[in-house]
Image: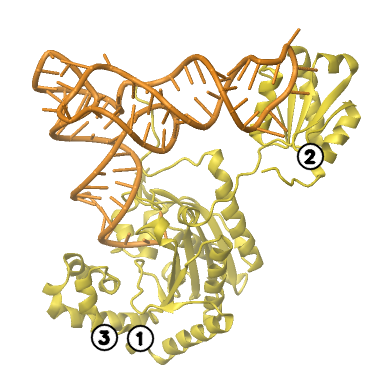
Amino acid sequence: MNPIRAVKGMNDVLPDEIGRWQHIEAAFARSMRLHGFREVRTPYVETTGLFVRAIGEVTDVVEKEMYSFAHHGEELTLRPEGTAGVARAYVEHAVHAKEPVSRWYYTGAMFRAERPQRGRYRQFYQLGAEIYGDPGPACDAELIDMLAAFLGDLGIGDVEVLVNSLGGPLTRARYKEALVTYLTPRASELSPDSQRRLLTSPLRILDSKSPIDQALVADAPSLHDVFDPSDRDHFASLERHLQALGTPYRIEPRLVRGLDYYTRTLFEMKGAKNKLGAGDTLLGGGRYDGMIADLGGPVVPAIGFAAGLERLLIASDNVPSSPTVDTFVAPLGQEAVSYALLFARDLRRLGVACEVDARGLSLKSLLRRANSLGARVVVILGESELRDEVVQVKDLVGHGQQRLRREEALHAVSELLRAPTAGHP
RNA sequence: GUGGCCGUAGCUCAGUUUGGUAGAGCGCUGGAUUGUGGCUCCAGCUGUCGCGGGUUCGAUCCCCGUCGGUCACCCCA
């Protein structure tokens, strides 16, 4: 019989690996708290229309990557990204009327039906945050600086911080027209992919990887040339703040990104190219001042980002996994098992993590097991200990062993665990 | 979705001069010390050689398909 397997592109995270996930999630939660963000949780399933409206009908995500299904006459979709659902919640709960600025973050699974490759899976995890109600470049700079520092905290080296501005919605529309006007007569020279983009999403020709496209685009009108004064001020101010913060960054005028909702500030951070290969975008984000209104809310400016957790995991250095228990309780013979369970319960009441192995193994095997679990202390309960109403407390680090009465033993275990862990992994 | 490469024990891999049904290390279990770990030594267990079909007297090896992985493209985190 064929075993049932996990769905393609959807992976298990086993206990041996979970420590690394938790390490990154904890670092993120800490950074968020230090910057005044509060966690929000929204459903994994939303109506399909939300993503169509928020992300854009002609984007690749909406056109071909969504897990959508009909259920009792409703068109539903497994969320392919976090921003749309969080924005929907912001509008639905009229949060703008309760507080002028909201800083929210989230963590969780997203779903896109793409061909999997390293750092890209069909169910994948994002860390993200949104700031509603602050239109200013200062909060853009703060966010970018925070993220660069976060990647540094994770030990990810060689991070590239790419920054651009698309201008406001009017500027963006104006530029799109200018670009189409410029490229249409040259359409036959474009790569096949870009010929298609010219009709659907012309701005994305700008970050095409094709050298042919790059050459053509090099002489095209620049986005920044059609900025209006407020676009120019916003971007200049962002740069001033980044410089004041000392955040390293590079202006990438052809950075565009694939989601339709972005306006003005846009950024992307890449790193660990040798480990990640082609999918080296660790995180990306930008301002989307029009989305809240598009979703039926008031006019509220917003900026946000999302980072790929698996990519951060691949890019960051390994963190050693921590031991699962402090103390291992080793009963010898069936007579000792009940006593071992009782002793373990008392230890746990003192906050000591411990495990009882009642499989009836030899003492040698029990000690080997304790060692491989990374326990620091073993409590041995054998026939002679039962008879004399004592336990053996063995220190696996300091190599000492004491024969103690029950109450003294509980105390001794706590004392041993309080000692420094030098020399033990 | 398109294309290239890969698929042998729980893990990392060796093996097959187009073919005669498999090995190592690690890990796991036990022992060397009739109740004392980490190092060492000894012994043992685990394989439909991804799956299905074809060629052949015979396929882990050759061919086709399929599934999974991987890399690149598209796109993105």
Quarter the C terminus of chain A occupies: top right
Quarter the N terminus of chain A occupies: top left
Instruction: Kindly identify the amino acid type of the residue bearing the numbered disc 1.
Output: His
Chain holding disc 1: A
Please tell me which of labels 2 and 3 falls first in the chain: 3
Per the rendering, the mark at residue A351 is: 2
Chain holding disc 2: A
Per the rendering, the mark at residue A224 is: 1
Up-down relation of residue A264 to residue A106 (above or below): below
User: Do discs 3 and 1 belong to a common subunit?
Assistant: yes
Q: Secondary structure at mark 2?
A: loop
Residue A20 in view (yes/no)? yes
Residue drawn where x is 87% and y is 13% of the image? A387
Instruction: Kindly indicate which chain is depicted in orange in the rendered structure.
Output: B
Alpha-carbon distance for marks 2 and 3?
A: 66 Å
Alpha-carbon distance for marks 2 and 1?
A: 61 Å
- Local crowd at mark 3 within 10 Å, few (<14), some, or many (≥20)? some
Q: Position of residue A61 (x, y in %)?
A: 33, 58
Instruction: Kindly indicate which chain is depicted in yellow in the rendered structure.
Output: A
Per the rendering, the mark at residue A221 is: 3
Nearest the viewer among B2 and A112 is: B2
Q: Position of residue A338 (x, y in %)?
A: 77, 18
Of badges 2 and 1, nearer the viewer stands: 2
- A379 left or right, relative to A222: right
Q: Position of residue A367 (x, y in %)?
A: 70, 26
Q: Are marks 2 and 1 in contact (CB under 8 Å)?
A: no
Instruction: Kindly identify the amino acid type of the residue bearing the numbered disc 3.
Output: Pro
Residue drawn where x is 56% and y is 61% of the image? A105
Please tell me which of labels 2 and 1 falls first in the chain: 1
